[in-house]
Image (cartoon, rainbow, N blue to C red):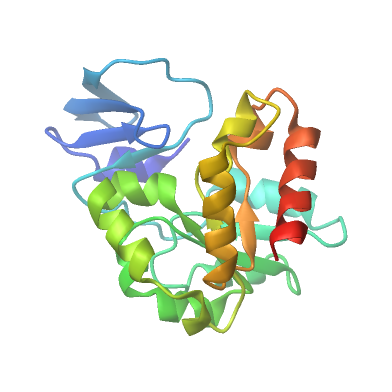
């Protein structure tokens, strides 16, 4: 469904799938088909993200699927739209012109977004620092160095941390001690909150995960 990946991928490119859990090396490209060799085996579940590691995939507008989902979601009150793989913030206008008045969240998950984070912050209503895809795009060490140096107060909008913040809750009833300490550190550094992903998307008890995260945020604040 993502024509831009087929358009931009080249033989020799590396595809990072599912937050860098599975790696593929592209061997040939056709208009609607990529042939690749597995570099690191694993289970690739449906509807997981795919990125090209070596270079950005250029997005010119929302996909038809995105537009259809906006048309449905904007009929409900209080819906915010999170925009993945923002480059410089201009992507917010793609959503605002289709859902006037809706809140837009900018997801920082590619190298270009790091350089343009001030511009992104001026165009959206909130920012998510998405360590999963960001780590896949720039490398784990570079991601960690940037996240450590970044200060949320430099942006004019609330900033939230995403990516394995409370991942233990995906399969367990309690977070790890390390996760709770990290959560406290994020709040002390000025983050407005955190984003749950696998914890609620595929977790064994999404309601419990969300409740525990909410309780911890209130207690640690």
The answer to whether residue 63 is above or below residue 189 is: above
Residue 152, position in %: x, y? 50, 75
Q: Foreground residue, 48 or 205?
A: 205
In-image side of 157 versus 182 (left or right) = right
**Residue name at image x 41 percent, y 55 percent:** 109
The quarter in which the C terminus is drawn is: bottom right
Give the left or right position of residue 124, taking residue 49 as reference. right
Comparing 157 with 6, the one in front is 157
Q: Quadrant for residue 35, please give it.
A: top left
Image spot of residue 185 (x, y percent): 53, 61
Left or right: 82 with respect to 73? Answer: left
Image coordinates of residue 88 in percent, x first then y, are 40, 72
Residue 182 appears in the rendering = yes
Query: Residue at image x 64%, y 32%?
Result: 169
Residue at the left extreme of this rendering: 12
The residue shown at (41%, 60%) is: 60
Q: Position of residue 27 (x, y in %)?
A: 15, 24
**Point 72% across, 51% down: residue:** 216
Reply above or below: 134 against 198: below
Residue 64 in view: no
């Amino acid at each position: 469904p993502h024509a831009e990946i087929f358009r931009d991928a080249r033989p020799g490119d590396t595809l990072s799938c599912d937050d860098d859990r599975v790696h593929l090396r592209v061997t040939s490209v056709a208009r609607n088909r990529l042939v690749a060799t597995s570099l690191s085996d694993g289970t690739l579940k449906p509807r997981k993200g795919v990125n090209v590691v070596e270079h950005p995939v250029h997005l010119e507008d929302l996909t038809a699927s995105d537009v259809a989902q906006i048309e449905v979601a904007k009929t409900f009150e209080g819906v915010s739209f999170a925009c993945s793989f923002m480059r410089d913030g201009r992507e917010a206008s793609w959503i605002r012109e289709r859902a006037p008045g809706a809140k837009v969240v900018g997801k920082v998950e590619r190298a270009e977004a790091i350089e343009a984070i001030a511009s992104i912050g001026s165009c959206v209503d909130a920012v998510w620092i998405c360590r999963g895809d960001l780590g896949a795009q720039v490398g784990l060490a570079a991601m960690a160095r940037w996240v450590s140096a970044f200060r949320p107060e430099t942006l004019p909008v609330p900033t939230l941390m995403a990516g394995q913040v409370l991942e233990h809750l995906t399969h367990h009833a309690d977070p790890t001690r390390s996760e709770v300490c990290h959560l406290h550190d994020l709040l002390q550094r000025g983050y407005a909150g955190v984003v749950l992903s696998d914890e609620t998307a595929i977790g064994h008890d999404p309601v419990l995960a969300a409740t525990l995260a909410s309780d911890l945020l209130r207690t640690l604040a």
